Amino acid sequence: MSRLDRFLFSHEWDEKFPTIRQQRLTRVLSDHFPIMLECGQFRQGKRPFRFENMWLQSEGFVERVKGWWQSYPFQGAPSFVLAQKLKALKGDLKKWNEECFGNVAVKSHQVLAELRVLETVAESRSLSILTTDQQVIADCITHFYTGLYSEESGWRPKLDNLAFSMISAEDAAWLERPFGEEEVVGVLKAFNGDKAPGPDGFPMAFFQACWDVVHNEVMESIKYFHEVGRQILDSVLIANEVLDSRLKVGLPGVLCKLDIEKAYDHVSWDFLIYLLRRCGFSGKWCNWIWFCISTVRFSILVNGSPQSFFASSTGLRQGDPLSPLLFVIVMETLSHLMDRATIGGYISGFAVGSGVDPLVASHLLFVDDTLIFCNADQVQIAHLRAVFSWFEAVSGLKVNLAKSEMVPVGVVPNLESLVELMGCNIRSLPMTYLGLPLGANFNSKTIWNTVIERMEKKLGGWKRLYLSKGGKLTLLRSTLSSIPTYFLSLFHLPAGVASRLEKIQRDFLWGGLGEAHKMHLVNWTQICKPIQAGGLGVKNLRRFNKALQGKWLWRYGMERDAYWRKVVEIKYGSMWGGWCSEEGHGSYGVSVWKSIRKDWGCFVPFISYRVGAGDKVQFWHAIWCSDLPLKVLFPELFSIAREKDASVAALMSFSNGHLALGCEFFSESPRLGIGILGCLYGIDLLSNLGWNGPGSALLE
């Protein structure tokens, strides 16, 4: 036995826990034996039902379920019928499983026992028994979670004088519309069938596979119920651009990264419903939401056995698709309180843009990830703490200052006093925000270390497996090349890092991981070509990086009202028509937009403009009525044009549903004027971009 294959403990531990024993388990993959510290035998209770997805692979499974389902004679409310049929189905599935598969756990133990015999490491000493009262353990655990999900009744202040964004009456009515089976099926198919099931034990894979069997009861239950987007990367881009502006100005400041204590668990239901009504949601919709959050019952598994159910009076369920949406609405309260404090001059925020009216960013919210921008001033920190107190009073959510962090921006001589006043921890730049670097140099290689480590760690488990070239290629395309996607979507990929990532992939494919170098049979450039072009379909990370960053250029022209676009526009300015920002001058700093903007020259040949009113599209220079700019198609007319940078609206008029040329075109050159008219047939009168490159249907 190796020195690694043992536990070390003191005499005091041995006196307090005399029944512990060490067991050496079967060696499966590693060259070491795993060891387990046993503390005695626990009394096992009744195991809850769990649907096994392997049952779906059994021939005739759906037909068998259909026969059982149709044989159940339950009557009553649709929800009652559905619940009773699922309950009866559990019993039939348990019996069928024992007859068809037997006890899987017992078989697994038998196989492991045979392996232990083969390894000649079977233990001869009998198991010790740890005597304890399991009911006491179960009661303590249940009591803890009952308190966690309960709220003491009492008064909370309201925010009647704080204005909230409201949805329109049309949107409120649309939310109440009954949804049909097609929409339900679409949502059902979007779920991951292998995710953990709810208390009934049936995962989504069961409903996906057996929808034709159970759809009537499910849809009737839904019918009975009726009768009685910002992207995560936007926040990271905004944070880096705001921080870059502050660092270049040279004024000291602080970032506060907040931790919301047990965020989902402490949301006040009464406040949530109050907030929904303030935002314009109808009473019927609010009642539906109340029903969804208040009818939840919890049961704690103790040693695999479920305890009695208990109700909750506060909090949102983790894992429920509805919970993040409701939580975002609650966090709007903190956003409005921060806005009120900024407008009142109590908190300054960081200014973006050097004009007369700069944009001031005081905070960024993405679900429960919160970032505060503030001056390095004790008075402002005191006001910030007051905002947190108000937020806790109205919503039930508490900012855990002991786990929150303060980050100095520039030279902050009074940092220690600010941290003491706030009661938080100190961090330094660069840091991590939403899983991506914040405050790092745009071309830094060190920020990619985590990506490289993740790829190498993933390969560490794979390299022991005996995989064919086809198996390695499948893993390479499906998993390995997708690991850096999140970083590639925002940050420029340095050449050195790209070479390192490609080498990791090449070595894995050809079998050179930690071994002697093996011959690479095909050039990597050929491997990265599409399958249709004779390649193997592996992503070229450099091109993939350019494509993902090109999406930002596309979004800049299309998302005129997006907050991230306003930050970029006021910081760098916009080109003619507002389709892209100006290039920007000076050092890159920690900006990420400059590296995105430099690819505009490669991007613009593949886009065309849809005219709309014509005031945002250049007549001669833009691609808007043919495959080439008009200055290229009609160079003679362009050479004599008086206004070469004029817009379409300045040189044309809209009449009777069609665009018409001004008379000066025909007076200058009748033949060329008629030629231009041929390009104007069927112009789309909607101002936006069109994509002329590959994948145009997806982009448009």
Image (tube, rainbow, N blue to C red):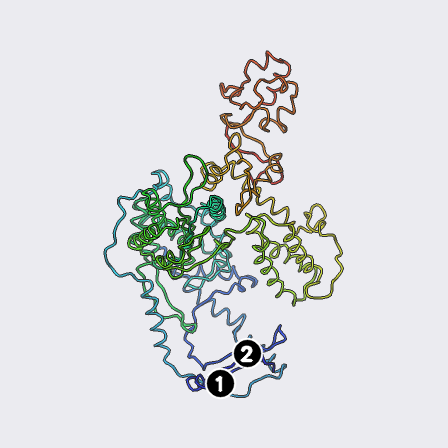
Mark on residue 467?
none
Q: Residues within 10 Å of mark 1 (few under 14, many from 20)?
A: some
Residue at numbered disc 1: 127
Q: Nearer the viewer, mark 1 or mark 2?
A: 2
Q: Amino acid at mark 2?
A: Ile
Q: Disc 1 and disc 2: Cα gap in Å?
A: 15 Å
The quadrant of the image that shows the N terminus is bottom right
Q: Is residue 150 left or right of residue 127?
A: left
State the residue at coordinates (71%, 63%): 512
Residue 639 position by quadrant: top right
Q: Is residue 264 above or below residue 248?
A: below
Q: Is residue 120 above or below residue 505?
A: below
State the residue at coordinates (64%, 14%): 671
- Name of the residue lying farthest toward the bottom: 125
For marks 1 and 2, the one nearer the N-term is: 2
State the residue at coordinates (54%, 22%): 646
Along the viewing direction, whichever of 595 and 521 lies nearer the viewer: 595
SS type, badge 1: loop
- Residue 426 drawn at (x, y percent): 43, 59
Residue 505 position by quadrant: bottom right
Q: Is residue 419 left or right of residue 582?
A: left
Mark on residue 35?
2
- Residue 462 drawn at (x, y percent): 63, 64
Along the viewing direction, whichever of 362 and 530 lies nearer the viewer: 362
- Name of the residue lying farthest toward the top: 667
- Residue 51 drawn at (x, y percent): 48, 64
Q: Amino acid at mark 1?
A: Leu
